[in-house]
């Protein structure tokens, strides 16, 4: 059972806080962090990785991930499967570095900064922390970064709406009690298994159930980012509402946002 990363208030960072850090083949501990951690993937991570590997979402999930249960919500999390014979670590790390570096997960982009989230009356609130593993020599570097500069340099987007929707769903479900098996499977399909979700909405009774002419959903056939946003809108509405008409209205609004007019 896993939970979203949390730390005590005293160790939180602001975007303006500074820290020294550098990583690369010249650092003695290079690659060690990639072998020592458990890496949780968000939906955007899965989408980027299966694209760069040029395989389907189902194949990516089967070959490279483990499905675990988030402790508070009962909803599924997807973890990178450790290499054979290891309890932790990344299947994509090599002696010369990461072979999927351009598509590396957010947790890897952000390191040595880590992130936790909480749901407040004002919505999702993200918190940032500095991780200092005892083996890490990167902190001996002379170059300093602000947290904001580090995130920009690594291509990490704190306000990524897809990650925030995903995290909000996990935290909101935790407040309402553990998810049912059907809710767990729906969340897994919509958040992580995008190709099978596409088949679900285009080739099943989905258009009939929710009153969508086939041509209305057709633009989602080739547009992965739009499809993922629609998938998260669908699972959000389904977890929040028992009334199919309210789900239908939420989906119409999601489609209109993607394809105005």
Image (cartoon, rainbow, N blue to C red):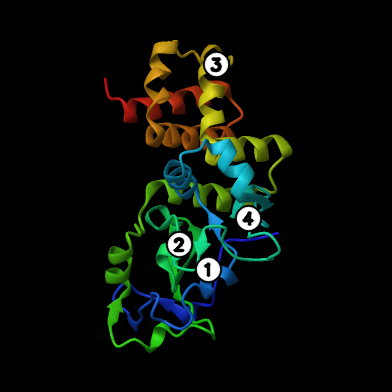
Front-most of 205 and 66? 66
Element type where label 1 sits in the image: helix
Find residue 114 and report its horizontal and vertical position in percent.
47, 69
| Up-down relation of residue 87 to residue 232 (above or below) | below
Element type where label 3 sits in the image: helix
Labels 2 & 3 near each other (Cβ < 8 A): no
| Residue 100 visible in the shown view | yes
Quadrant where the C terminus is found in the figure: top left
Labels 1 & 2 near each other (Cβ < 8 A): yes
Q: CA distance from mark 1 to mark 4?
A: 12 Å
Quadrant where the N terminus is found in the figure: bottom right
Pointer 2 or 4: first along the chain: 4
Residue located at (46% from left, 56% from top): 105
Labels 3 & 4 near each other (Cβ < 8 A): no
Residue at label 2? Answer: 98
Q: CA distance from mark 3 to mark 4?
A: 31 Å
On residue 34, the disc is 1
Labels 1 & 4 near each other (Cβ < 8 A): no
Side (left or right) of 220 relative to 81 = left
Pointer 1 or 2: first along the chain: 1
Q: Residue furthest front?
A: 95
């Amino acid at each position: 059972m896993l939970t979203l990363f949390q730390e005590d208030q005293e160790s939180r960072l602001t975007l303006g806080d500074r820290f020294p850090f550098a990583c690369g083949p010249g650092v003695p501990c290079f690659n060690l962090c990639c072998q020592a951690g458990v890496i949780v993937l968000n939906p955007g991570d899965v989408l980027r990785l299966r694209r760069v590997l040029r395989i389907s979402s189902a194949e990516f999930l089967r070959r490279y991930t483990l499905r675990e249960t988030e402790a508070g919500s009962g909803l599924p999390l997807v973890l990178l499967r450790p290499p054979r014979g290891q309890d932790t670590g990344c299947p994509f790390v090599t002696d010369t570095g990461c072979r999927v570096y351009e598509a590396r997960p957010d947790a890897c982009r952000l390191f040595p900064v880590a992130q936790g989230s909480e749901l407040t009356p004002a919505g999702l609130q993200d918190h940032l922390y500095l991780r200092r593993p005892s083996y890490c020599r990167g902190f001996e570097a002379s170059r300093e970064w602000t947290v904001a500069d580090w995130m920009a340099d690594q291509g990490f987007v704190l306000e990524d709406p897809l990650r925030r929707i995903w995290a909000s769903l996990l935290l909101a479900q935790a407040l309402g009690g553990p998810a049912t098996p059907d809710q767990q499977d729906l969340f897994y399909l919509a958040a992580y298994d995008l190709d099978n979700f596409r088949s679900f909405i285009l080739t099943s009774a989905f258009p009939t159930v929710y009153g969508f002419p086939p041509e209305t959903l057709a633009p989602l056939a080739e547009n992965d980012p739009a499809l993922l946003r629609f998938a998260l809108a669908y699972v959000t509405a389904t977890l929040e509402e028992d009334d199919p008409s309210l789900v239908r209205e939420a989906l119409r609004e999601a489609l209109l946002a993607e394809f105005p007019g």
